[in-house]
Amino acid sequence: MTSKTGLEFKVGDAVVYPAHGVGKVAAVETQEVAGMSLEVYVVTFDHEKMTLRVPTKKAKTAGLRSLANDDVVSRALTTLKGRARIKRTMWSRRAQEYEAKINSGDLISIAEVVRDLHRADSQPEQSYSERQLYESALDRMAREVAAANRIDKDAAVKLLAKSLSAKKAVVAANEAAEAADADSEAEAA
């Protein structure tokens, strides 16, 4: 998707940078660095009050990408409805894996973190670090879903909450089916 000017993104495009989430291309500038001329994307992140300069030739390898398309967003929402897959490893190792998934910038990986760390009202409270990771992943996902669907962040959070609450129904249905299978196997024996 390179334009006629050779640039992949143009001023005003919403983009995703893996470590910071959704930003906007504010400008394309040429800067003098170590005696060399370097063309950079100037990406602003309003929620972090930060500006990032990414060389245009290194944008792809740095992980700068356009917003997720509708297919990826719907797959991420479907991921939220799935059953949590929590490995039986030490929390510090899982926390590192969750952090890596959040910073990967991949919407589906972020959805997996949100799904795995989500706690329903009936479940025990999260530790401080679990809650921090969950809120970070939820915020990152909500910002991209909001930008991709052209809605505000609050509406995106409600959409994610709706998918997470649908998870309860899916899990309950799966558990009921598993119990029915176990009963029919017991009767057959």
Image (cartoon, rainbow, N blue to C red):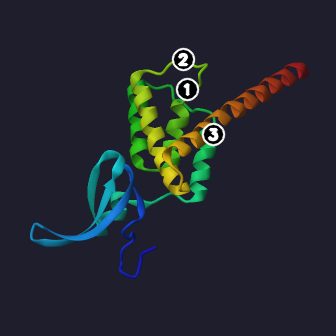
User: Which residue is identified by label 2?
Assistant: 124
Q: Are marks 1 and 3 in contact (CB under 8 Å)?
A: no
- Secondary structure under badge 2? loop
- Sequence-wise first label, 2 or 1: 1
Image coords of residue 19 (percent x, y): 35, 48
Q: CA distance from mark 2 to mark 1?
A: 7 Å
Task: Please give the name of the residue rendered at 27% of the width and 56% of the height, measured from the top-left corner.
Answer: 52
* Quarter of the image that includes the C terminus: top right
Quadrant housing residue 133:
top left
185 on left or right of 51: right
- Report whether residue 19 is seen: no
What residue type is disc 1 on? Arg
Location of residue 181 with respect to 30 vertically, above or below: above
What residue type is disc 2 on? Pro
Q: CA distance from mark 1 to mark 3?
A: 13 Å
User: Which residue is identified by label 1?
Assistant: 119
Crowding near pointer 3: few (<14 within 10 Å), some, many (20+)? some
Crowding near pointer 1: few (<14 within 10 Å), some, many (20+)? some
Image coords of residue 154 (percent x, y): 51, 42
Image coords of residue 41 (percent x, y): 30, 65
Q: Are marks 2 and 1 in contact (CB under 8 Å)?
A: yes
Q: Are marks 3 and 2 in contact (CB under 8 Å)?
A: no
- Sequence-wise first label, 1 or 3: 1
